[in-house]
Image (tube, rainbow, N blue to C red):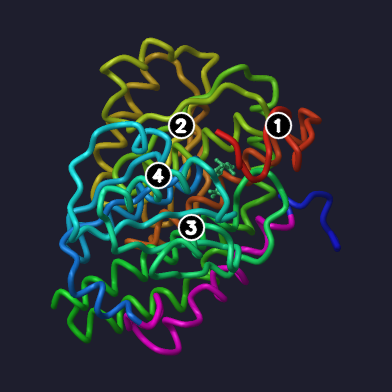
């Protein structure tokens, strides 16, 4: 079943060109239409004035990227909350809010209980973005979008994450169109970018030999810091989560602008700092944050794209992802941080597919 691979996680990382292509098939064939989310999606979408995303772990990080797309493309206000926090606090329900749960398994208790709580508070507009057909979350939701990642067996989520991002991008385009914010030429441009996405994912996978070299340098570290800004801050979070989950290296992620508000105190010449730095509108800001790290001797490991300009010197290791992918760039940058964690774990000899203390599907509180 593993074919040429040593672990499910490795296989699942490498399945991402196919998984993203399958998940995008509907929108590429039919264009941006509400029916992608279920037969009464047009009615529901016409009634909503905001979005609340509920999820846990990696799926929550997908939600953090989704919020930025929903607000910038569709102009719709969006909040993202961890299910286990939402369910126990007093929130202000808005019956016109679309409650979106995101889950690979569809069985995560924290997310399920959050959905029940939302419904008890009067929320009727519910959408499940889920990878497992007919699981609890889609059954409890009015609208459903199935990611088509295929079975994910490795405990650390990989292809589920990138396909969730595809689903959220399609949702943002759909709400944008419904709200009169997606001109025909813009729609065509986004669809073309989506068509090219699986190929760009493959290019990112081809960086594996270079990433392996970095991973060997990480394996004897006790700590690592991940930095990103804007759309790439959630990718820094995801990189840190993957590294700690499977290699047991303590890793933390910060939005790079937060450095001087505290975490900079951790930086010395033993601290590897991974920076997600593609050529987006925040690149210059990220570069000045990188200077702050270098000035303290921190070792910079930078994922840049072909359009961001850096000079590689001893303290700045740079790996270049493909040409800048615009709004889809976080999907591309998820790949190298997954590979970095995978190879660091291999090097450390941990049980990559079944990390200690963790379960694939968290059905208890
Ligand atoms: C991390 C990971 C977890 C899950 C989380 C939610 O690699 O796999 O953080 O993302 O437990 O699981 P789902 O998406 O099944 O609700």
> Is tag 4's residue or tag 3's residue first in the polypeptide sequence?
4
* Residue behind mark 1: 216
Q: Residues within 10 Å of mark 2 (few under 14, many from 20)?
A: many
Q: Is residue 14 part of the magenta span, yes or no?
A: yes
The count of marks equals 4
x, y percent for residue 205: 62, 58
Q: Secondary structure at mark 1?
A: helix
Tell me if I can see residue 309 in this picture. no
For residue 227, what is the image quadrant? Answer: top left
Circles 2 and 3, Cβ within 8 Å, touching? The answer is no
Describe residue 271's horizontal placement relative to residue 97 as left or right: right
* Residue behind mark 4: 114
Q: CA distance from mark 4 to mark 3?
A: 30 Å
Query: Mark 4 or mark 2, which is nearer to you?
Result: 4
Q: Is residue 57 part of the magenta span, yes or no?
A: no
Circles 1 and 2, Cβ within 8 Å, touching? The answer is no
Magenta residue span: 11-39
> Is tag 4's residue or tag 2's residue first in the polypeptide sequence?
4
For the point 44% across and 65% down, which residue is it?
A: 166
Q: Secondary structure at mark 4?
A: helix
Q: CA distance from mark 1 to mark 3?
A: 22 Å
């Amino acid at each position: 079943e593993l074919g040429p691979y040593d672990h499910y996680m490795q296989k699942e990382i490498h399945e991402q060109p196919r998984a993203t292509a399958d998940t995008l098939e509907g929108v590429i064939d039919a264009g941006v239409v509400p029916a992608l989310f279920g037969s009464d999606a047009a009615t529901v979408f016409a009634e909503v004035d905001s979005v609340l995303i509920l999820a846990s772990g990696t799926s929550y990080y997908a939600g953090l990227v989704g919020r930025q797309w929903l607000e910038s493309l569709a102009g719709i206000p969006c909040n993202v909350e961890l299910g286990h926090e939402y369910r126990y606090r007093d929130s202000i329900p808005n019956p016109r809010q679309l409650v979106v749960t995101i889950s690979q398994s569809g069985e995560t208790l924290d997310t399920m209980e959050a959905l029940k709580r939302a419904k008890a508070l009067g929320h009727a507009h519910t959408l499940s973005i889920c990878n497992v057909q007919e699981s609890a979350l889609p059954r409890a939701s009015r609208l459903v979008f199935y990611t088509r990642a295929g079975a994910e067996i490795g405990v650390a989520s990989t292809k589920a994450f990138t396909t969730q991002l595809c689903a959220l991008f399609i949702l943002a385009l759909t709400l944008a169109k419904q709200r009169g914010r997606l001109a025909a030429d813009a729609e065509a441009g986004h669809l073309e970018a989506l068509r090219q996405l699986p190929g760009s994912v493959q290019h990112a996978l081809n960086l594996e030999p270079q990433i392996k070299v970095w991973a060997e340098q990480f394996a004897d570290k006790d700590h690592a810091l991940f930095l990103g800004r804007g759309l790439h801050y959630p990718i820094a979070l995801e990189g840190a989560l993957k590294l700690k989950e499977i290699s047991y290296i303590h890793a933390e992620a910060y939005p790079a602008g937060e450095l001087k508000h505290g975490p900079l105190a951790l930086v010395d010449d033993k601290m590897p700092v991974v920076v997600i730095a593609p050529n987006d509108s925040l690149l210059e800001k990220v570069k000045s944050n990188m200077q702050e790290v270098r000035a303290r001797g921190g070792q910079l490991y930078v994922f840049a794209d072909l359009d961001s300009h850096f000079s590689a010197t001893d303290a700045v290791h740079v790996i270049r992802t493909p040409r800048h992918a615009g709004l889809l760039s976080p999907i591309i940058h998820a790949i190298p941080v997954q590979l970095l964690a995978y190879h660091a774990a291999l090097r450390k000899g941990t049980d990559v597919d079944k990390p200690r203390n963790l379960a694939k599907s968290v059905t208890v509180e």
